[in-house]
Image: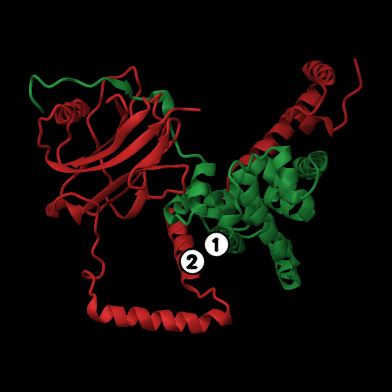
Chain colours: A green, B red
Amino acid sequence: MGSQNTPHLTVVSGGGSLVQAPSDDALMALTAGGEARAFEALAQRHLHRVVSFCTRFVGNQVDGEELAQEVFVSLWSHRARYQSRQQFSAFLFTLAVNHCRNHQRWWRRWLRADEQARNTPLSAEPASALEALLDAERGRWLHDEVRKLSPLLREAVLLRFEQGLDYRAIGLVCGCSEGNARARVFRAVEQLRTAQREVSR
Amino acid sequence: MKPCPSSETWPRLLEGDLPEREAQTVREHVQTCTVCAAQLEETRALLGALAKPLAEPDAQRVRKVMKRVRETERQPQWSRRWVPLAVAATAALASVAVWWRPGAPGTFTARGGNTQWRQRVSVEVRSALNAGQKWAARASLMAETPLVVWYRNIEKTRPLYLAAFLVDGAGEVHWVAPAWPADEPPPLLAELPVSDSDALMPWSFIPANPAAGDGELVTWVVDEALNVEAVEQAEAARRVGTQVSLPGVVWRQPVRIEPAP
């Protein structure tokens, strides 16, 4: 293409090391400006993480999926409150934890979830692909034992090991100090280890 | 042999929460105690099981949340005192609509280009830092600004290929799309995915030390899988006053490139 005598330009970057996915912070800044496409990119990246967190927190897939949808609708509604360079995961999971806590406060749901957990045998037939995954990951006991943790311990241990948040971010999400977040996580692991030992006996 | 550590030790060891001296002592103990070694492995397995996600990315789930967001946006958010004003504004708009008739509903209008292309494809390079706003008539671009590519392509009968680059103040080309490792030869242009709605290319690009001065963001969509060198030659020819016709549509956005602070 082009004439033989046309000069060539110098390509100064093809950019292997410079190519990077837009950061969550950049996408959230776009979202804060009302850019729905950036928000969709965030949803593609993080919605399944929130589904996972909420499902483990409330103990069933249907409510977990619904809560995750509500979390992202809230994220859109509260987009203007996001401050650039804030840790996006902390912002997102603060919304997720608040939704899960509100869900738990509704005593009818408490009763229903607890009854469901008690009535579900360990060898139950998987009700869905997600339930099948639950069974595949070290048996259903882990799912049930996480549900038995107090809400404060449950959210802390899920944020640390399922979502990979650091202790500072967990403190921000849970409204406690970094040291307190650390203590909650270790206490939760200790309770799960106790249950694990009983299962392996 | 030292006494076995308490069970609280294992997660703290795995999380790096023990002082190094104590951690070293525990590690040495584990090498000689099979019971503690088993406990450490069980704890590691437990944390690994917790880390396994229950849900995978799912496009249908994302579509559902976007639908809900759009529904939320459509719900009126105004307080009662604005309602009379809204009614008056609606009436004013309705009267304007009597004599002003926009194009057919659903028509997709892209910037620039010829008639054959303009309703099929649109591509824009934008800054990732200014909330995705369109550029002003002569916008400023900081040297280290990450650039992102938005596109829409409803041409489903043939593949289209994208070239997007920044021409800096010295006339040098910084490619945004395609991008390739510096130690590999320049590739062919990448195919532009079909998308009925506006979509974002899954990467951002930071131009490497672009020369300050007047530059251009150039977006080219062609229907041949050209080599990037062909595009560069056409661009170079244009700069010396020779127009080279490429089989496609081009958009140019003048930008003033500011030096990095």
Q: Position of residue B156 (x, y in %)?
A: 20, 52
The quarter of the rendered structure image containing the N terminus of chain A is top left
Residue at screen point 46% across, 72% down: B74
Q: Would residue B215 be found to the left or right of residue B115 on screen?
A: right
Q: Position of residue A36 (x, y in %)?
A: 44, 56
Report which residue position mark 1 lands on: A73
Q: Secondary structure at mark 2?
A: helix
Picture layout, residue A26 above or below residue B260: below
Q: Which amino acid is tagged 2?
A: Arg
The quarter of the rendered structure image containing the C terminus of chain A is top right
Q: Which amino acid is tagged 1?
A: Val
Q: Label 2 to label 1, Cα distance in Å?
A: 7 Å
- Chain containing mark 2: B
Residue at screen point 73% across, 73% down: A108
Asked if marks 2 and 1 touch (Cβ < 8 Å), the reply is: yes
Picture layout, residue B48 above or below residue B83: above
Where residue B5 sits, quadrant-wise, is: top right
**In the rendering, which numbered label is found on residue B68?**
2
